[in-house]
Image: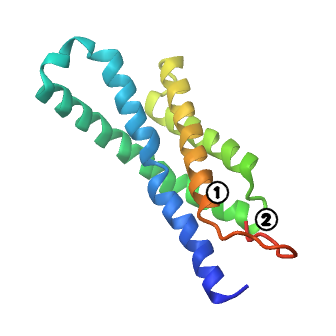
Amino acid sequence: MTLERIFLYYSNARVAFAVSPAVPAILTGLFLLAEEYPYALGDIIYVLKTFIGMVIVFLYVSYSMALFVAVPLFLLLRRFGLVNFYTIILSSIFVGGLGGALIGRFQSIETQLLLTGCGFTSGLAFWLIYRCRSPIVGPGEVSDG
């Protein structure tokens, strides 16, 4: 593997880890905003402040879980050569469920399912960014992932 391919390989993972936790945070903010505040659509300033506040909280949780759980799990999977679509999705569902357990403390099943779904969404975004940015593998070449 050339030095350029090594840099591109690690660059894909960095970009995917930088972007993928933000996807479920923004989607969850939109979902909760639509569920909790449908009557406040006339007051746009109130809606924007509420949305931004929720997204900031979810971004903090998403990036914390990604940094302390998902990155070591990805490195472990990569070490054993198990990085594929299924392991990324299953591990991201695990990370989302763990985040739901830490935040929701099993108070409501809806919170647990929502955050597990956020883990799935983040894993799907991670996989799409990670694989779509990879160079095209030619005939006879082996994929880095």
In the depicted structure, whether residue 98 falls above or below residue 135: above
Residue 41 in picture, x, y percent from top left: 20, 18
Is the residue under label 1 in contact with that under label 2 (CB below 8 Å)?
Answer: no
The residue at the far bottom in this view is: 3
Residue 102 in picture, x, y percent from top left: 48, 36
How many other residues sit within 10 Å of disc 2, few (<14), some (14-19) or many (≥20)?
few
The residue at the far top in this view is: 39
User: Number of numbered discs present?
Assistant: 2
In this rendering, would 46 be left or right of 59? Answer: left
Nearest the eye: 39 or 100? 39
- Residue at 57% across / 32% down in the picture? 116
In the depicted structure, whether residue 108 falls above or below residue 63: above
Nearest the eye: 99 or 62? 62
Residue 104, numbered circle: none
Residue 73, numbered circle: 1
- What amino acid type is highlighted by mark number 1? Leu
- Residue at 26% across / 32% down in the picture? 51
Q: Nearer the viewer, mark 2 or mark 1?
A: 2
The residue identified by callout 2 is 81
In the figure, residue 8 lies in which quadrant?
bottom right
In the depicted structure, whether residue 58 falls above or below residue 107: below
- What amino acid type is highlighted by mark number 2? Gly
In the figure, residue 140 lies in which quadrant?
bottom right
